Image: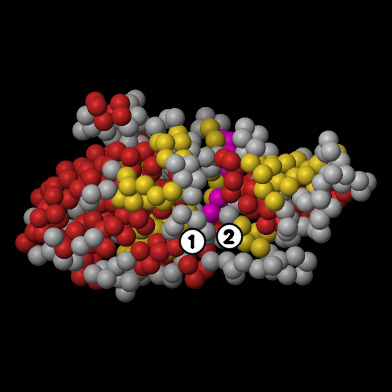
Amino acid sequence: MRAVTTLSVVVLASAGIGHAVVTSLDADIARVDPFKDMKNRPRAGHGMNVLLVGTDSRENISEAERRKYRLGGAPCHCTDTMMIVHISENRERASVVSLPRDSYARTPSHTDRTTGQRHGGHVIKLNAAYAEGGPNLTVRTVESMTHVKIDHYLEVDFTSFMKTVDVLGGVEICTPKPLKDSYTGLDLTAGEHELNGGEALQYVRSRHADGSSDLGRMQRQQRFMAALIARSTSSGVLLNPMKFRDITRAVLGSVRADKEFGTGELLDLGRAMRNFSPSSSEFTTVPIGRMGYAVKGIGSTLLWDAAKAGRLFRALREDEPLAARKSEGRSKGGKGGAPVRVDVAPQQIRVQVENGTRTVGLGGKVDRALAATGFRTTRMPVNARERGATTRTVIAYDPRWDRSARSLAAALPGSSLRVVRGQGAVLKVTVGTDYHGVRTVRVREFGVTTGDQVDCG
C-alpha cells in the first residue's frame, strides 16, 4: 500500500512537472539490486509489472506517533504489504493484484542474508521471503509463484506513507459500517472520514476490524488506494511544482527502488498517464482456494486457488483488463439458471440449520441442499424453539461475518438478515414457511473492482 502511494504520487506528478525537477529525484532514491544473478526468469509479457513492497520499518517515527497510532513493538523485517501493479502497454490502465502476506509459498534455493547459510527451496509464508533473502528472494519467489516477470521493484516504509497523506492534505474514505480495531487503535463510525497520515496508516494496517483478517485488510488498502488516486487527480496538487516538491521530499527519503527505475521511466509514465483517473484502475486479490492451511513449523497459511490464480496471472502477462474477466454478472440463478455470484465462497461459510416450521424433516432437507451447493453445514439440523411461528427464513450472523451472511442470503431467496453480536463464525439459518429452495452460488472469480466503483456501499 505504501509503495503504491509512492508510485501514484511520483508517476502522476511527473506528468505535470518539468524534466529538471524529476531528474533531481534520482539522487534521493536509495537503490537496490533485486534482479542480481537471476536466471531462468519468466518470459516478458506486454506492459510493465512493478512489485510494490511495504515493509514494517518504523525507525523514523517519533515516540508520540508510536503511542498515538499503536506502532510499538519490534519490526519483523518482513513485508507488511505486497502488490503487483501492472501498467498496460498503452498506458491507459493499471491493474493492482494484492498478494496476501500469509500466502503459502515455496522459495527457490538461496543464501540467507542474515546467517549466510545456503538453503534449498522450502515452504514459508510469502512475507518471510524478505527476511530471509531481501528484495532478491522476494522477487524470485513471486516470479516462481506467478510466472509473471517483474520489471521494477519499489519499497517504502511507514514513515513515507504517513507523510505522503499529510502533504496531500489527507484522503477521504467512506466506510459502510463502523470499524474498530484495538490492535491499531482504528475507531471509525459509518460514513465519510477525512484521514490524516497516521489515521490512514491505522486504516490500511487493521486486520481485526472484522472477521476477514488479512483479506479484509487488503480490500481496505485497495479502497484507500482508489481514494488516493481520486484525491491526487482531482485536487490539482500534482500540477503545483511547490506542492510536488514537498511531496517528494516527504516520501523519497524512505524509498528504495531497482537501479533501472529512474528519471526516464518516471517521465515516460507521467506523460502516458497524464489523464489517469480512478476509472483507469482496477483492483483484485489472488483467489484463495483454502483458508487456514496448516503447515508444520509455519502455522496457518492461505493456499491459492491454482486454476483461478493461473488465469489471473495469465491475464497480466497478456495485458488483458481483469474487469473484463469478472463473472457473468448477477443472475436470478436457481435450478437450470446460471449461478449467482457472491463475494465469499460457500466452502468457507459454516452454517447451522434450524427448522422454524411444523413441516417434519424440512431442516434436514435445507441442510442437505445447502451442503450440496458447497456450504459447510453442521449436518445436524435442529428444531427452532418457536417452531411453527416462523414465516420468513432468517439468517442470524455476527457482524464480523457480514460478507458471508450476504453470500448465504443469495442462496436463500427471500431470506432476511439479523445481526447477533458475539454469535461467532457459524451462521444460523431459521427456515420459515416461505422457503422455496436453494440457489446455486459461486464466488466471483477475481472480485475485481475499478477505482470509480469504490463507494460507501
Answer few, some or many: residues within 10 Å of disc 1's Cα (few below 14, many 20 plus, some between 14 and 19).
many
Look at the numbered discs 2 and 1 and tell me whether their residues touch, using CB distance below 8 Å. yes
Write down the region rendered in magenta: 287-295
Q: Is residue 152 above or below residue 105?
A: below
- Which residue sits at x=16%, y=63%? 239
Tell me how far mark 2 sits from mark 1, CA to CA: 8 Å
- Based on the displayed image, in which of its 4 quarters is residue 68 positioned? top left
Specify the principal SS of the magenta part.
strand
- Which residue sits at x=44%, y=30%? 182
The image position of residue 53, as x and y in percent, is 33, 47
Task: Residue lying at the far left in this picture: please name it.
Answer: 20
Is 213 part of what is drawn in magenta?
Answer: no
Q: Nearer the viewer, residue 372 or 229?
A: 229
Q: Is residue 349 above or below residue 284?
A: above
- Which residue sits at x=22%, y=51%? 168
Can you see residue 396? Answer: yes
Q: Is residue 180 left or right of residue 415?
A: left
Is 288 part of what is drawn in magenta?
Answer: yes
Q: Is residue 46 above or below residue 82?
A: below
The numbered disc on residue 444 is 2
Q: Nearer the viewer, residue 260 or 350?
A: 350
Identify which amino acid the numbered label 2 is placed on.
Arg
Answer few, some or many: residues within 10 Å of disc 2's Cα (few below 14, many 20 plus, some between 14 and 19).
many
The residue carrying mark 1 is 448
Can you see residue 36? Answer: no
Task: Residue lying at the far bottom in this picture: please name it.
Answer: 90
Instruction: Say which element carries label 2.
Output: loop
- Based on the displayed image, in which of its 4 quarters is residue 379 positioned? top right
- Which residue sits at x=64%, y=53%? 407
The image position of residue 9, as x and y in percent, is 23, 56
